[in-house]
Amino acid sequence: MIEVRDLVVRYGPATALDKVSLTVGAGEMVALVGPNGAGKSTMVNTLSGILKPAAGTVAVRGRLAHVPEGRQVFGDLTVEDNLRLGGRRYRERDTGPVHAILPRLAELRHRRAGTLSGGEQQMVAVGRALMSRPDVLAVDELSLGLAPIIVADLVRHLRELNATRGLAVLLIEQNARLALELCSRAYVLEAGRIVAEGPSEELARDDRVSVAYLGGSHE
Amino acid sequence: MNDLPAYLVTGLGTGCGYALIGSGLVAVYRVTRVVNFAQGAFAVVGAMCASSFLTALPHGLAEPAAVVVAAIVGLLVGIVALATNPQSALIVTLGLSVFAYAVEVLVWGDQPRSFAGLPGAVTIGDARVQTHYLLIIAVTLPVFAALALFFTRTDTGKALTACASNPYAARVIGIDVRRMGLLAFMIGGALGGLAGVLVTPVQQITFDTDVALIVNGFAAAILGGLTRPAVTLVGGLLLGVTQALVAGYGNAAHQTDIALGLMIAVMIWRAARRPAVETV
C-alpha cells in the first residue's frame, strides 16, 4: 500500500529525512519508532502530501488517511462536523459506519470537539480519518498524553479494523513497547535515517533497540 | 422635538455598513490570519463600479454587478497577499490599498461620487429619515443570516471554519487551505463591495473614503476578536448608533474619534483579560 524509496525531506538547509525507504503491505501493521526529532512526523506528513520530498519517491496505492499527532480536531465544530469533513475529499458523508466502529462518537455527535477530553478527541481524530474509508491508516503518536486505559481501547479498535476489514496501519510511535506489541514489523528511525528494521519480535530482542527504547540494559 | 428614533434608524443603517466591512475583515482574518487593510478599498470599488454601471444598467442589476467586481478584486488581492506569510501580507494589503487609489483616480477621478438609492423618506418620531436607511438594514440583516447559515450548514462553510480552527488538521484531511483563503478574500471583497453599494446613496464616496470605512469596520470587528461575524454585526450597529447620537446631540466631527476610542478600549480590555504569562 505504501512504498517509500530513498526519501529525502529538507526544511531549508536541515535534512529531516535522509534516504529513507520503507514499505507497508496490504493488511499489514507496521510501526515506525524513534525518539523525538527523529523525523517520524515528517515521514507521515510527506505521505499525506503536506510536505514535498526533495528527492526519492513516495507511492501510495488506495486511500491513505492520516491521524495527526496531538489530537488535531476542529475544536469549533461538532463531532459530527469533524467526521463529515474527514470524508469530504472522497464525498463520503455517511457517518454510520464510523459510529458502528466507535459508538462513543455517536453519543458525542452534537458536542463541540474542543470541549471533549483528550481520549475522546483522539477518538474523533481516528473516526475522522476512517470517514474516508481508507485502505491504509497512518497514525502519528496514538498514545501521546493519553491514559493507558484509553490507549488500550484505541488499540483494540485498530486491531479490529485490521483483522475485520484488512486495514493496513502505519503506526508512528515514541512508545516503542506499544508499537512493537501491536505491529508485526517495525522500522527504527533516528536522526532522519532508518537504523534498524525487521519483524517486531526480532527488534524487541535486539540489544540496541531494547536498551534505547524498551528500558532494557546491556548484558 | 423627539429626534431619537430617527438617530437610531440612521445609526443602525450606517452601522450595517460598518458591520459588512468588519465582517469582510473577519471572513479573511479567521481563515488566513491576515488583517486585510484593503478591505475598505473593496467598498470604494463597489461604490464606484455601481455609479458607473448605473449609467447603462437599471437599479437591481448594476449593484449586484458591482458587488461581483468587488469580489473579483478581493480574489486578486488574496492571490497577491497569500503569496507571502500573514505578517508580510498585512503590509502587502496596505500597499495594495494605496495602489488602488491610483487606479480609482485614473478610472473615476478624484471627485466624490454618489447615486440615487431607494427614493423617499419616512417619518420616524418627529423627524424625517431617508427610506434608503431602511433598505440598508433590510439587506444587511438577511446577509448576516445567510453568512451564518453558510458557515454552519454548508460543507464549504464548514471547511472554511475548519481552516480557521486548525489549518494543519485541515491540510491533513485534504482541504486546500490556500484555496479556502482565496475564497475568504472573495467573500471579503463581496461584503466590502456590498457595503459600498449600500452606503453610497446616503454618503458620498471618494477614492480615499476607504480609510474611514476600514477604521469603523475594524472597530466593529475587533469587538469579536476579528473572528466572530455575529459580534461584528453587534459592534457595527453599536458604533453606528453611537456616532449618530454624538452627531445629533453633539459634534459630528468626533465620529471617527469614537471609532478609534472604541477600538483602543476594546483592545486594552482584551489584552487585560489575557494572562500576562501564558502557561504551556
Image (cartoon, coloured by chain):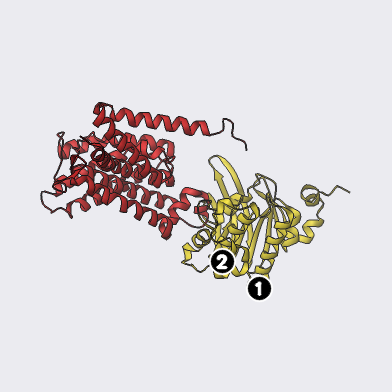
Chain colours: A yellow, B red
Amino acid identity at mark 2: Pro
Image coordinates of residue B21 in percent, x first then y, are 31, 42
Q: Is residue A72 visible?
A: no
Q: Confirm or deny contact between disc 2 and disc 1 (CB under 8 A).
A: no
- B222 or A32, which is in the foreground? B222
Neighbourhood count class around disc 2 (C-alpha, 10 Å): few under 14, some 14–19, many 20 upward = some
Residue bearing mark 1: A164
Image coordinates of residue B82 in percent, x first then y, are 39, 44
Image coordinates of residue A25 in percent, x first then y, are 64, 67
Rendered residue at 33%/30% (across/down)? B258
- Say whether residue A5 is left or right of residue B180: right
Amino acid identity at mark 1: Thr
Q: Is residue A35 visible?
A: yes
Residue B229 drawn above or below residue A110: above
- B98 or A196, which is in the foreground? B98
Q: Earlier in the sequence, mark 2 or mark 1?
A: 2
Residue bearing mark 2: A134
Rendered residue at 38%/36% (across/down)? B90
- A87 or B132, which is in the foreground? B132
Image coordinates of residue A99 in percent, x first then y, are 58, 67
Rendered residue at 50%/54% (across/down)? A77
